[in-house]
Image (cartoon, rainbow, N blue to C red):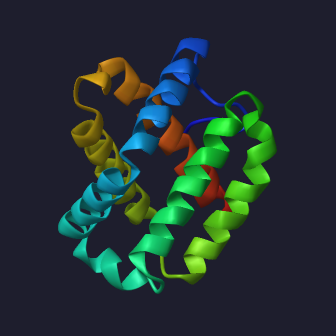
Amino acid sequence: MIPTNKLPLSARQIGLVRESFESLKEYETAVLVLFYGRLFEIAPETRPLFKIEIRDQAKKLMETLGLAIDALERFEELIPKLAELGRKHTTYGVQAHHYENLRSALLWAMGQALGVEFDRETRTAWDQLITTIATVMLEGVC
């Protein structure tokens, strides 16, 4: 289990996440189309969980990622917000295994959009960040 009171990223990993997020914002539409397409391909049961337009949902996802990126050095301040988000997602029907589908689809989409910039080290940093966020959200449900 990942300790969620502290983000398990080094200063270098934080830099890689920030840098790649700036690039992702340049390809935001493509990344999100790839992400949702991949998510619905690997977990078609998740499609009905989205009650709002995918464009609106995509905007919320980017905003949440942006908040997380902005708070990387103060991650503990973000924990209550993420826990509340986890509780909200439960009311939408999101289950624990859906977070793994999201992680997989998001990492895949980032890799497709960023190509060589999404090297092993950058992917690992993002993987740790997404896993930590999901863990905090799931702990908010308990």
Relative to 21, residue 93 above or below? below
Q: Quadrant of the N terminus?
A: top right
As drawn, 106 above or below 126: below
- The front one of 107 and 136 is 107
Outermost residue to the left:
41
Q: Position of residue 8 (x, y in %)?
A: 59, 26
Residue 76 left/right relative to 120: right
At a point 23% along the width and 65% down the height, the residue shown is: 37
62 relative position to 46: left or right: right
Count the labels in the image: 0
Q: Nearer the viewer, residue 32 or 102?
A: 32
Q: Residue furthest top?
A: 12
Residue 51: x %, y % from top left: 46, 86
Quarter residue 26 falls in? top left
In the image, taking residue 11 as reference, residue 40 lies left or right, namely: left
Q: Is residue 48 above or below residue 55?
A: below
Q: Quadrant of residue 108 in the image?
A: top left
Q: Is residue 95 visible?
A: no
Where residue 88 sits: x, y (%)?
Answer: 64, 74
Q: Residue at x 42, y 81 (%)?
A: 49
Residue for point 78% across, 55% down: 80
The residue most toward the front is: 26
In percent of width and height, residue 74 lies at 77, 33
**136 versus 96 height, above or below:** above
> Which quarter of the figure is the C terminus placed in?
bottom right
Q: Is residue 5 visible?
A: yes
